[in-house]
Image (spheres, rainbow, N blue to C red):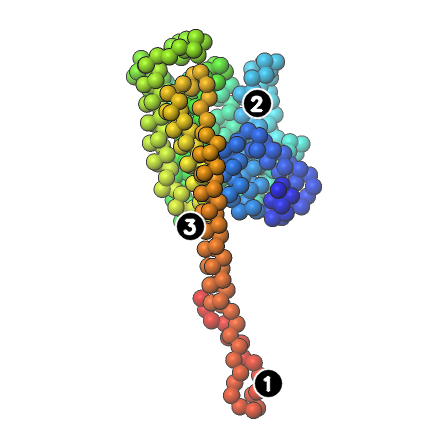
Amino acid sequence: MTACELDAAAVTDPALREAYATCRRLNARHGKTYFLATRLLPVERRPAVHALYGFARWADDIVDSLDATMTPADRARSLALLQARLETGLRDGGGPEPVVRALAHTAQRYAIDHRHFSDFMTAMRSDLEVTDYPTYADLRGYMHGSAAVIGLQMLPVLGTVVPREEAEPHAAALGVAFQLTNFLRDVGEDLDRGRVYLPQDLLAAHGVDREILRWSRDTGRRDPRITAALRAAEDLTRGVYREAAPGLAMLDPVSRPCIRTAFVLYGGILDAVADDGYAVLHRRSVVPRRRRLAVALDGLARVSAARARARARARTRSAAVAPVVTRPVGAAAASRVVVREEAA
């Protein structure tokens, strides 16, 4: 399928094709929910999404890898090197890093604001030093760079039926909603990395702090205060999904099934967390495979309908401007043809 996507996107340079293929493999391996949704996009737009995800994943792996041989200084150096290659790639194209080559090509093709990438890298650098957030406002400041900008990067690829600036707040909110979902699902894993992404004020409102979370993680025991705090985090996250929801109708109709599928599947993670009794400190909650399949099939049906409507509109426009051939009356004019184009 990689060759088909790249051919449709008119990516012909062999090195660039391999760079995009690298990003696609990262998406398929690490972003299973996101990758499934991406399959519902028009084929020519998929490489760009793989490039955006692949770069983000590459940077995130530098910060979050559990490789014990990497010291904080090693991570800082690797991130600084990636930052330098990103700046060069965005300015000149190319470079030795495949994920940067694909990203730079995508950014140029879709005129994506470079500030979104620099804001993302700022957030990644903060992960090397910041281990918790006193308030939700502090967390939202971090998530602007780590999540909101991902939605803003995606918007030019997806396309909109309204002025882009009208859709941007909803796209940013959707990126935040997805990340808050991951934060809730991954509380235990993040704690093992020394981080707590649930804001301290939300936890404290229910009598929870890092020490209690660590105790629960280490002993496998439950505490009703933790459950109450996690339920509050779920409620907070669902509120951000409500902020994002109006943006779905603002997207290009052929892109909507992809984002709607991601919207439903990520929301399903919240359902799985609740159904699992908020046991995220002890195990990862997952959306059942049958549920993912049902959502994907619904997305396919919506894709088919959207593409059929797009073809119908194209035929209507084509017919509206089709040449109308008439033959003037009269023997002297019998060989002349008058071609008239009717305006749409």
What percent of the width, then of the height, locates residue 166?
38, 44
Front residue of 87 and 299:
299
| Res. 4 image quadrant | top right
Please report contact status of discs 1 and 2: CB closer than 8 Å, yes or no. Answer: no
Asked if residue 149 shows in the view, the reply is no
Question: Which mark, by number, is residue 222?
Answer: none
The residue shown at (56%, 15%) is 72
Please name the residue that numbered disc 2 is placed on: 62
Front residue of 262 and 53:
262
Badge 3: few (under 14), some or many (20 or more) residues near its Cα, within 10 Å? few
Q: Disc count in the image?
A: 3
C-alpha separation, residue under disc 1 versus residue under disc 2 = 74 Å
Asked whether, in this view, residue 232 is left or right of residue 109, the answer is left
Badge 2: few (under 14), some or many (20 or more) residues near its Cα, within 10 Å? many
| Res. 11 image quadrant | top right
What percent of the width, then of the height, locates residue 276?
40, 22
| Res. 237 image quadrant | top left
The residue shown at (49%, 38%) is 37
Q: Sequence-wise, which precedes: disc 1 or disc 2?
A: 2
Identify residue type, mark 3.
Val
Task: Check the image and report above or below for 340 versus 212.
Answer: below
Asked if residue 78 shows in the view, the reply is yes
Asked whether, in this view, residue 43 is left or right of residue 176, the answer is right
Q: Name the quadrant of the N terminus.
A: top right
Please report contact status of discs 3 and 2: CB closer than 8 Å, yes or no. Answer: no
